Amino acid sequence: MNLNEAIRNRRSIRKYKDLAIPHSIIEEIVEDASYSPSWKHTQTPRYICIENKELINKIAEDMVLGFDMNTPVLKGCPAIIIVAYLTNRCGYERDGSFSTPKEDRFEMFDAGVASQTLCLVAYEKGLGTVITGYFDEDKISKLIDMPENQKIGSVIGIGYPDETPNVPRRKPVSDLLTFK
């Protein structure tokens, strides 16, 4: 599989087979995702893999901010990967001042790049993923005992797909690109 195939064919998966993912595969995915670019090479993304069904169910039932469509999706995942990031590094100078008017928003940007890379690598390895955007960061952080210097960037369900979603229609390049 080449990069273009992965980008064009990777879909959000919402139904998974009841199969555990070997730790060696999760480790390979995280190792590859660690090559994602980051602000001044700060390498702030961190990954927490939750396999404990009790924790997954608690997140799915109590921490999706009322977006109940995510409850069965997350409950059906054999694992959830939390992509977190270290705070107060991306977008900062050594003296603690902001480097650009974007201030600390590069933290979330780096977590997003890492999340996309993780999903593409997982797809290449035959796994499906779904990035969920509705989550209660405070409750999840307490549940998994998140270090104080980290925040959650994304909550990603991961597993062996039990569906093959169609590719949704895309906007034409003429609607997306402007030359000046």
Image (spheres, helix red, strand yellow):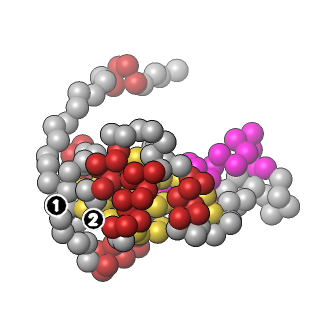
Image: magenta residue range: 98-117
The answer to whether residue 22 shows anywhere in this view is yes
Image coords of residue 107 (percent x, y): 62, 53
Residue count near mark 2 (Cα–Cα under 10 Å), binned few <14, some 14–19, many ≥20: many
Q: What residue sits 76% from the left and 50% below the top? A: 99
Query: Which numbered disc, 2 or 1, marks the residue that appears first in the sequence?
Result: 1
Vertical order, 132 against 123 (above or below): above
| Residue of label 2 | 78
Evaluate whether residue 38 shows in this view: no
Per the model, the C-alpha gap separating discs 2 and 1 is 8 Å
Q: Secondary structure at mark 1?
A: loop
87 to the left or right of 84 = right
Q: Residue furthest bottom?
A: 24
What residue sits right under mark 1 in the picture? 17
Asked if 90 appears above or below 42 in the picture, the reply is: above
Residue 25: percent from left, percent from top: 29, 74
Q: Residue at x 68, y 60 (%)?
A: 87
In the rendered structure, find residue 154 and report the number of the disc placed on it. Answer: none
Circle 2 sits in a helix, a strand or a loop, which is it?
Answer: loop
Q: Is 103 in the magenta?
A: yes
Q: Amino acid at mark 1?
A: Lys
Identified at 21% across, 46% down, the residue is 9
Quadrant in the picture for residue 8: top left
Q: Residue at x 57, y 61 (%)?
A: 141
Task: Give percent across and percent down for residue 175.
Answer: 37, 19
